[in-house]
Image (cartoon, helix red, strand yellow):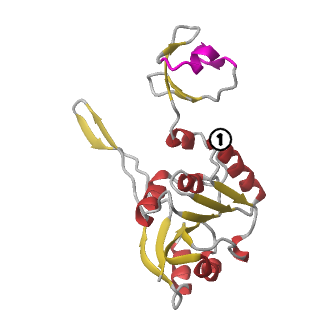
Amino acid sequence: MLIETGTGKKFLVKDTGEDYHTSFGVIKSKDLKSSKSPVRSSTGKTFLLMEASFPDLWENFQRGPQIMLQKDIGLILAKTGINKKSEVVDAGGGSGSLCLSLANVCKKVTVYENNPEHHRVVQRNIALTEMDNITLKQEDIYGGIKEKNLDLITLDLPEPWQVIDHAEKSLKNGGHLVIYLPNLTQVKKYLESVRGTSIKVIETLELLERRWIISDQIMRPDFQMLGHTGFMIFCRKM
């Protein structure tokens, strides 16, 4: 359940059967279970009640390692065309931002995350979403991929070239491989290592995001923009 103050302040609330305490007063548990909206807290503050959507949950993910941002995730979803029939492998899981976004769309997602601390963060975020179509493994994908006939493999790893042979064996013909890397030295090494394989590079992209401020007579881009976060290399098995 998501409760919102009407001023942009939002709270994600789990049904524990107890009253919910906020800095704007206490909301009774019976009001949280009601389908009525808005409701009032003990101080008379009005709250809007609504079902939490996936982006609401995403905003509440526990952060561990650098989280993949929505602008990059959206491009991956659009470029690969994955859907409710798709089966996917993601490595490494990091904070779970990408793998859970994939699970929100796909039939099945398997996550390889070898780092114990990152593994715990992904576990917590999976529990937050309550998704049952995602499997988390504390395994090193450099050692191999057990899943076969995959529609997509995503790699957010320092050395993705170590996974090329495994990806060739696990992807279906026409399946997608997406590599996410922070610097061009890694990009160049990956592009060189994939030559002569059945993994064909389609394009290498980065996506920049700029917000606009539109209010009364003001219409201008924000002075700050979300610039480089990572390079995405889009490939297919052919």
Is 182 placed above or below 170 here?
A: above
Give the residue at the far bottom of this rendering: 196
- Range of residues picked out in magenta: 18-36
* Residue 163, image quadrant: bottom right
Q: Residue at x 70, y 57 (%)?
A: 136
Q: Amino acid at mark 1?
A: Leu
Report the residue marked by disc 1.
Answer: 128
Q: Position of residue 109 (x, y in %)?
A: 61, 59
Q: Position of residue 7 (x, y in %)?
A: 44, 23
Q: Residue at x 44, y 66 (%)?
A: 80
Q: Position of residue 74 (x, y in %)?
A: 44, 56
Give the residue at the far front of this rendering: 85
Can residue 185 be seen in this snapshot? no
Question: Dot 1, crowdedness within 10 Å: few (<14), some or many (≥20)?
Answer: some
Q: Residue 137 versus residue 26: which sits nearer the camera? A: 137
Quadrant location of the N terminus in the rendered image: top right
Mark 1 secondary-structure assignment: helix
